[in-house]
Image: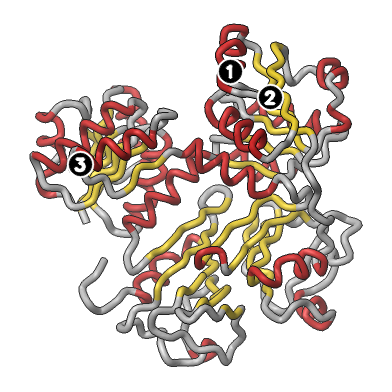
């Protein structure tokens, strides 16, 4: 498949690297000469220097022969314009645009009114805010990911030294009587990523992902030694950017007290006109004295959401030491994500990975419903719809030759039934199947699941 990517930033690099690995032909349009040179060093792709707001450049990029345009420049207007030209001039089948404006809902409506069909409009900051809100009530969890319309849940947690599961093998945990429909699917240990089997031991310091049915979620949390969910009372937010404001607005609607820290006085004034009940503090929210004076030891959570990764990590560590029950760090650089885990930060979120995950579900082979990427692209959870032509249908899982380092985590039937399968389970046409897989196995897995009806 030929895919044109407008913009050559980090999101474009992440997407291109993945798509090239999977056999797609990629053209990237980027204005910066320095960035073009960097991309040429890293990617086996055509890098075209120019503006994606130029019809001539879009034509030179071969947009008329492309099956997809992914517009992820840093300028919303350029992304929308590129999609408009792709439709009107080149009849590109699939169009994706990233928008950062808080008016994204208005732009969706305007695009519909203009009959401009953009298959996916991504607002990573909103998605990041939703991801944070899902785990604020759960101090022991790093993230909660829904599959099959919420019927299947995958949660991440750090294994502390005093947790009873530390030192146990997967077999020993199975003998301890966990809820039937549950599975430890991924273990992150230092630089290692492990798809665990029976003899695999869970060690203190591991970050594990556990998959279960919605109705068994609370019981599985108790089995894994996760502290009970808490009522939110007071939440501190560091940084007055858009994502922080969205989180504050939602917490206000839930009746939670919020204090938002922002160093820029003019920005504070603007935020105060947007938020109704949040206390906006013109101060350095990474300063220990300030945090103590503002009563951080009584806070339910501390969210570090500035544009500076280092500030977010350091502030989260400080807040944890000062008594915040839950800390969250917004992190853009993927190589910082494993570091956040090792530093004991409960939750780290990446708007860049959020954007990449959403885009990949429009590009991948087969009937991909959702894609979730872990850490530095080392592993994925992929939700696929089993089509009638798949060679995986009608045979017991233990008889299938699944790609190495892949497991079936859950099967959600069309009739509503959900199972976390064992070896005798069978995949049926129309099932939603959640795979947990290492990066090395993704292409083989999706090729095996590809419908034989010509769909891609």
Asked whether, in this view, residue 156 is left or right of residue 56, the answer is: right
Quadrant (top left/top right/bottom left/bottom right) for the C terminus:
bottom left
Q: Earlier in the sequence, mark 2 or mark 1?
A: 1
- Residue drawn at (32%, 56%) of the image: 363
Pointer 2 residue: 278
**On screen, residue 144 above or below 116:** below
Q: Earlier in the sequence, mark 3 or mark 1?
A: 3
Is any part of residue 372 visible from this angle? yes
Pinpoint residue 418: horizontal percent, then vertical percent. Answer: 57, 78
Distance between the alpha carbons at the discs numbered 2 and 3: 38 Å
SS label for mark 2: loop
Q: Quadrant of residue 181?
A: bottom right
Give yes or no for contact between labels 3 and 1 (Cβ–Cβ under 8 Å). no
Pinpoint residue 128: horizontal percent, then vertical percent. Answer: 55, 41
Q: Quadrant of residue 270?
A: top right
The mark lying in front, picked from 2 and 3, is 2
Name the residue furthest right: 162
- Residue drawn at (56%, 25%) of the image: 307
Give yes or no for contact between labels 2 and 1 (Cβ–Cβ under 8 Å). yes
Pointer 1 residue: 271
| Mark 3 Cα shell of 10 Å, populated few (<14), some (14-19), many (≥20) | some
Q: Which of the numbered marks, if any, corresponds to residue 116?
A: 3
Q: Quadrant of residue 195?
A: bottom right
């Amino acid at each position: 498949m030929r895919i044109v990517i407008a913009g050559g930033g980090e999101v474009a690099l992440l997407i291109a690297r993945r798509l090239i690995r999977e056999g797609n032909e990629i053209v990237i349009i980027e204005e910066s000469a320095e960035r073009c040179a960097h991309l040429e060093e890293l990617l086996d792709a055509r890098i075209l220097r120019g503006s994606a707001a130029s019809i001539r450049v879009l034509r030179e990029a071969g947009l008329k022969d492309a099956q997809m345009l992914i517009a992820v420049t840093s300028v919303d207007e350029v992304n929308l314009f590129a999609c408009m030209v792709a439709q009107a001039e080149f009849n590109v089948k699939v169009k994706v645009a990233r928008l950062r404006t808080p008016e994204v809902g208005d732009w969706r409506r305007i695009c519909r009114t203009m009959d401009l069909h953009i298959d996916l409009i991504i607002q990573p900051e909103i998605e990041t805010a939703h991801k944070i809100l899902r785990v604020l009530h759960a101090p022991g969890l790093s993230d909660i990911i829904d599959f099959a319309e919420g019927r299947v849940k995958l949660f991440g947690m750090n294994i502390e030294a005093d947790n009873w599961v530390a030192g146990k093998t997967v077999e020993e945990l199975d003998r301890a009587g966990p809820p039937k429909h549950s599975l430890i699917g991924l273990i992150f240990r230092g630089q290692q990523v492990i798809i665990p089997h029976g003899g695999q031991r869970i060690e203190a310091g591991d970050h594990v992902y556990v998959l279960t049915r919605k109705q068994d979620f609370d019981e599985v949390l108790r089995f894994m030694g996760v502290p009970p969910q808490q009522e939110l009372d007071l939440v501190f937010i560091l940084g007055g950017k858009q994502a922080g404001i969205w989180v504050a607005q939602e917490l206000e609607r839930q009746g939670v007290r919020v204090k938002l820290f922002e160093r820029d006085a003019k920005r504070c004034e603007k935020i105060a006109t947007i938020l109704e009940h949040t206390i906006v503090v013109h101060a350095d929210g990474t300063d220990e004295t300030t945090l103590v004076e503002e009563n951080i030891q009584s806070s339910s959570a501390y969210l570090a959401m500035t544009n500076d990764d280092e500030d977010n990590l350091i502030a989260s560590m400080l807040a944890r030491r000062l008594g915040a029950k839950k800390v969250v760090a917004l992190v853009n650089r993927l190589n910082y994500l494993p570091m956040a885990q090792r530093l004991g930060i409960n939750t780290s979120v990446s708007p860049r990975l959020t954007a990449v995950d959403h885009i990949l579900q429009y590009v991948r082979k087969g009937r991909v419903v959702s894609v979730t990427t872990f850490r530095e692209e080392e592993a994925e959870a992929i939700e696929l719809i089993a089509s009638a032509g798949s060679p995986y249908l009608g045979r017991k899982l233990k008889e299938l030759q699944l790609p190495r380092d892949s497991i079936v985590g859950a099967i959600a039937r069309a009739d509503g039934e959900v199972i976390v399968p064992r070896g005798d389970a069978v995949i049926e046409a129309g099932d939603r199947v959640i795979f947990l897989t290492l990066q090395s196995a993704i292409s083989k897995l999706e090729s095996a699941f590809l419908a034989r009806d010509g769909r891609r």
